[in-house]
Image: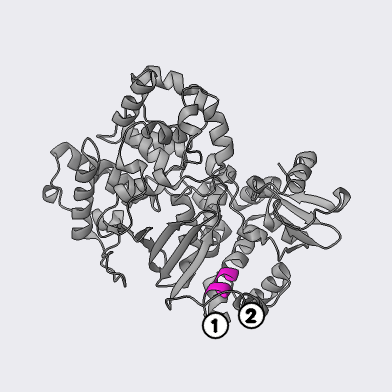
Amino acid sequence: MHTDTERCVRAVRSKDARFDGWFFTAVLTTRVYCRPSCPVVPPKVENMTFYPSAAACQQAGFRACKRCRPDTSPGSPEWNARADSVARAMRLISDGVVDREGVPGLAARLGYSPRQIERQLLAELGAGPLALARAQRAQTARLLIETTELPMADVAFAAGFSSVRTFNDTIREVFALTPGELRARVARRTKPPATPGTITLRLPYRAPLNPSNLFGHLAATAVPGVEEWRDGAYRRTLTLPYGHGVVALTPRPDHIACRLSLTDPRDLTLAISRCRRLLDLDADPVAVDDQLRSDPVLAPLVDPAPGRRVPRTVDGAEFAVRAVLGQQVSTAAARTHAARLVAAHGVPVDDPEGGLTHLFPTPEALAGLDPEALALPRSRRTTLTTLVAALADGSLRLGADADRERARAQLIALPGFGPWTVEVIAMRALGDPDAFLPTDLGIRRGARRLGLPSTPAALVARAAAWRPWRAYAVQYLWTVDDHPINHLPAQGCSS
């Protein structure tokens, strides 16, 4: 979009927050870059230039605006919607892969050479993987500076910088403030964290956001010990590269309040990325809803409650295991099966609030489980153990780097995997915005009540008009049924 100057100028002049994250405005006279919705008076057109990423702005010598803080913009919705190598690379960079494995590690995950990845990212984003990772490190460092009392040296290494000097230089270059000045500036207008060791931040999103189905779904399907709904927040444990964490996510009118407790602050970047992916916060709800409400059958569902998101997952492998446990059983039975697996094979953790007890077991931890110990039909045991083996040996990948169509083909080849299981994994684990569940019982009931075809083949044909947002159409179709997944839980604790 950054190449469409006229459209970008209109967005800047109208301060349209829907375009935050799509492009960045660099001002030639002040050498500052902003998000489109920056509250300051827009500069003259001849003084504006547009870039596709914050990293490209920084490489061109611009610093971040102190008013609109463009580094806190929602991510571009393109990277979740697209499935090509650039989108997969951006998802991996947001997960901190470059910091942990370098550019060769990023390229190896994608099946390309480092030179090919560099060329593709430069062409689309105006910056290579190192520059994109550097911009993300600066954002992570700012969060740690502003929300914790960590010494600056600890902040530097937790954010992924190789030295304190590089950290200091980058912060000064990006924010035009030293790390100490940045912390002092924020300290004047914020309170210290209520609980030592916690990181409190705001996760931005593009409005509107309807929290009912998003948090309702997560709470209704929560695995006891791993997830819970407590005092208006969805809480869960996280398995992370350097340790583990506990996160509490609370819907607010203009953001998601996020409270993180991490055993190692180096996991902050990945934890934030996983929370954003879980809640589908980088979606473009206006584009989605405009497409869906053009169908007169869906319009009465979209108009009263726009902005529904697709509840996704923090870990693709975890969700795939849970999808198998949920085959042909009720939501309550699926939670029970998953809770037994967690109690037997999950790693115990301490939760200061007392509701969470375990991490969900990894495929490696499940690889040696005894099928006879599973209270499942024999065919389901085979399905689960075969899936776990493929995930544990790395032949099946369901993470941010996964090729969606290849993963679909691999899943359907496994015993016991039908279209419903494959598509629900594609929708929630692989993040495919066009995944569709024509065989789902709730979808078929909703289709019948709306006068839509209820047979799978006919419904797929009718749903062609909803592409490429059929996963969002699923969320609206589910609302036709009165099910707990469609409603925010009552205040209090449920797990």
Residue at the extreme right = 46
Residue 459 placement (x, y as % from top left)? 40, 20
Magenta-drawn segment: 141-147
In which quadrant is the N terminus drawn? top right
What is the quadrant of residue 443 in the picture? top left
Q: For the point 48% across and 66% down, which residue is it?
A: 268
**x, y percentage for residue 401?**
48, 48
- Snapshot quadrant of residue 4: top right
- The majority secondary structure of the magenta stretch comes to helix
Please give the residue where the numbered disc 2 appears in the rendered image.
Answer: 184
Q: Secondary structure at mark 1?
A: loop
State how many labels appear: 2
Packing grade of label 1 (10 A; few <14, some 14-19, many >=20) is few
Q: Position of residue 347 (x, y in %)?
A: 26, 65
Give percent across and percent down for residue 269: 51, 63
First along the sequence among labels 2 and 1:
1
Identify whether 99 is placed above or below 459.
below
Q: Nearer the viewer, residue 426 or 290?
A: 290
**Residue 50 visible here:** yes
Q: According to the image, label 1 marks what residue?
A: 151
The stretch drawn in magenta includes residue 142: yes
Residue at 59% across, 71% down: 161
